[in-house]
Image (spheres, helix red, strand yellow):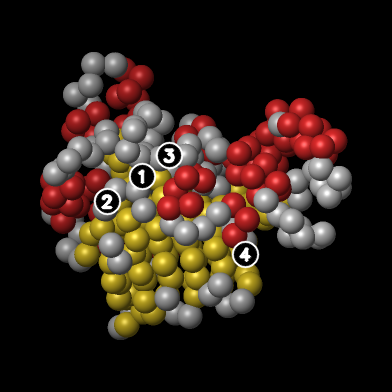
Amino acid sequence: MIEVTLLGTGSPIPDADRAGPATLVRAGGQTLLVDCGRGVQMRLAGAGSSAGALTALLLTHLHSDHIGDLGDLIITRWITSFGPNPVPLTIIGPPGTADVVDATLRAFAPDIGYRLAHHPDLTGPPALDVQEFTDGVVWQRDGVVVRAAPTDHRPVAPTIGFRVEHAAASVVLAGDTVPCATLDELASGAGALVHTVIRKDLVDAMPLQRIRDICDYHSSVEQAADTAARADVGILVLTHYVPGIGPGGYDEWRALAATVFPRQIELGDDLHRVEVHPAVCGRGTVTPAG
């Protein structure tokens, strides 16, 4: 079984009720965080996890809303690891990730220096293992396999999606993208597809061109549903809502997706959880868990 928790379902626009984009995936004893938008550590706590519990951080791309709390995550894991040989945090992302991590460490250099000077048991800076990929197997441990494939979020490039597989269960996390053949292939037959979405009909009606521009490189609800249908996935999980969904608005978004995707559709507040079970007859059977 793979457990998926929508830690943050928000967007670059601050929302009092939604943290920035982040999804927690638990499988086979591994705890994987996909993206780390604002407020991610509060949501990790709400999900019963923490920076120290993570076995890897997977970044779909380097837009600010998807990496906004990267520095806080790195520092918190470092100062809450009390063993003599802390396990490095593996950070996996597209090319450019290493530069962003290096720049983040430089930004926090004063803080790191203060803590090294104050705590004798801290003998070095945060332990990190940064790896860059565009496709292929990026993680393999204890029966959990993570694959990556390119997506299309141009002019943001490169961007990647991830497929997590364990014991015949599988979940694909698309990140920000428009429909593309590489995502179709990555998602083919998966138990669940977690896809970021916007309401193009509502965004197009906004008066500011800069806001309307986001229609160019994000999938609408219907496009995400069409991707799920083409890939024959078991369940579609929507997240990263633009604009934010108000009280009582979920049914309308779900109905739009249902015009294209006839199976189970999940969306909800931060900390919404879904269990993805091993495939049956070529598809995942999925149990929502509140």
Q: CA distance from mark 1 to mark 2?
A: 8 Å
Report the residue marked by disc 4: 139
Q: Mark 1, residues whose alpha carbon is within 10 Å: few (<14), some, or many (≥20)?
A: many
Frontmost residue, 133 versus 92: 92
First in sequence: mark 1 vs mark 4: 1
- Tell me the tag on residue 9: 1
Q: CA distance from mark 1 to mark 4?
A: 25 Å
First in sequence: mark 3 vs mark 2: 3
Secondary structure under tag 2 reads loop
| Residue depicted at 34% across the width and 33% down the height | 16
Q: Are marks 3 and 2 in contact (CB under 8 Å)?
A: no
- Tell me the tag on residue 268: 2
Frontmost residue, 210 versus 184: 210
Disc 2 marks a residue whose amino acid type is Gly
Q: Are marks 3 and 4 in contact (CB under 8 Å)?
A: no
First in sequence: mark 3 vs mark 4: 3
Q: Where in the figure is residue 212, as x and y percent of width and height?
A: 30, 24
Q: Mark 4, residues whose alpha carbon is within 10 Å: few (<14), some, or many (≥20)?
A: some
Quadrant containing the N terminus in the rendered view: bottom left
Q: Is residue 130 visible?
A: no
Q: CA distance from mark 3 to mark 4?
A: 24 Å
